[in-house]
Amino acid sequence: MKDEFTSYEEGLKRLLEALSGNRRQHLKALGYEASLRENIKRVRLYSDNETLRSDRNRILIQLNDLAMVTINKSFNELCRSSQYPPKQEIPTALPTDFFDRANEYITQVRRSVEKALEIFSDRHILPFQCERMSSSFQHCSTLISTEEIEKLPLTDATRTSFVRMLQAIIHEVQCLLKLLRDFEPVCQEPAGQKLKRQIYKKLNELHRYMREKKFISTFSSSTDD
């Protein structure tokens, strides 16, 4: 059966052939293949809808990412060589304001971490200080979301590396938020001392990671279209 999705099936075939000598990446590609084929099967049986399109876009971005970091070609390229062009092109351009918001996010996180380290160096911490720290990190999370990161098109190794580092920081901030919320009600109790040490350690690790990477200005300039 040939239709507008045939190009995806041809692209999958080419990608799997290219990865045949890399067992780990081949297995990952097989997982994405199964998801995409199931999605296409549902479209062919029941017609397309917004949920299927959204899921398909997510899978295509994952395939694009995998293809770029393994064979240095986008999944789009693998599909375009088919007689039938893709119905749904994989996004290749980052949102125009992405790096501005990424810069702002990193700046705000760094400031929040440095302020929190000052507070946690004191022997006694008050509940209102915990609340302010949580609010500060929560504000950072409004600038860039995990969901947005997962949908970003990763069209080259540089861009992939940048996004992966940003994901690591977002993950650590989320962990810190949970620890701070757990710590707030027990911050003046002996039971809270273990949590305090955990938070202080995580703050130092995040601060060191951000200081070592210094990636925002470098990547923002090198990935502009």
Image: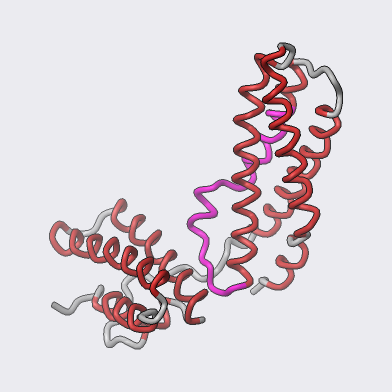
Q: Quadrant of residue 114?
A: top right
User: Which residue corresponds to the image point at 59% horizontal and 73% vertical from the top-left?
Assistant: 157
Measuring 73% from the left and 45% from the top, which residue is drawn there? 205
Magenta stretch secondary structure, dominant: helix
Compared to residue 22, the image places residue 95 above or below, namely above
Up-down: is 126 above or below 89? above
Screen quadrant of the C terminus: bottom right
Span of residues in magenta? 133-157
Q: Position of residue 8 (x, y in %)?
A: 30, 75
Does the segment drawn in magenta span residue 21? no
Lateral position of residue 6 relative to residue 31, left or right: left
Q: How many marks?
A: 0
What colour scheme governs how the chains and residues are painted in the rendered image of this protein?
Answer: secondary structure
**Residue 27's x, y, as percent?**
35, 68
> Is 150 inside the magenta-drawn segment?
yes
| Residue at the spot 27% in from the left edge and 83% down from the top edge | 84
In the displayed structure, 216 sits above or below 127; it is below
Question: Would residue 48 appear left or right of 131 to someone viewing this image?
Answer: left
Camera-side residue: 187 or 131?
A: 187
Q: Quadrant of the N terminus?
A: bottom left
**Left-right relation of 47 to 209:** left
Residue 5, position as x, y percentages in the image? 25, 73
Left-right relation of 156 to 139: left
Looking at the picture, how far across and down is residue 201, in whole percent? 74, 37
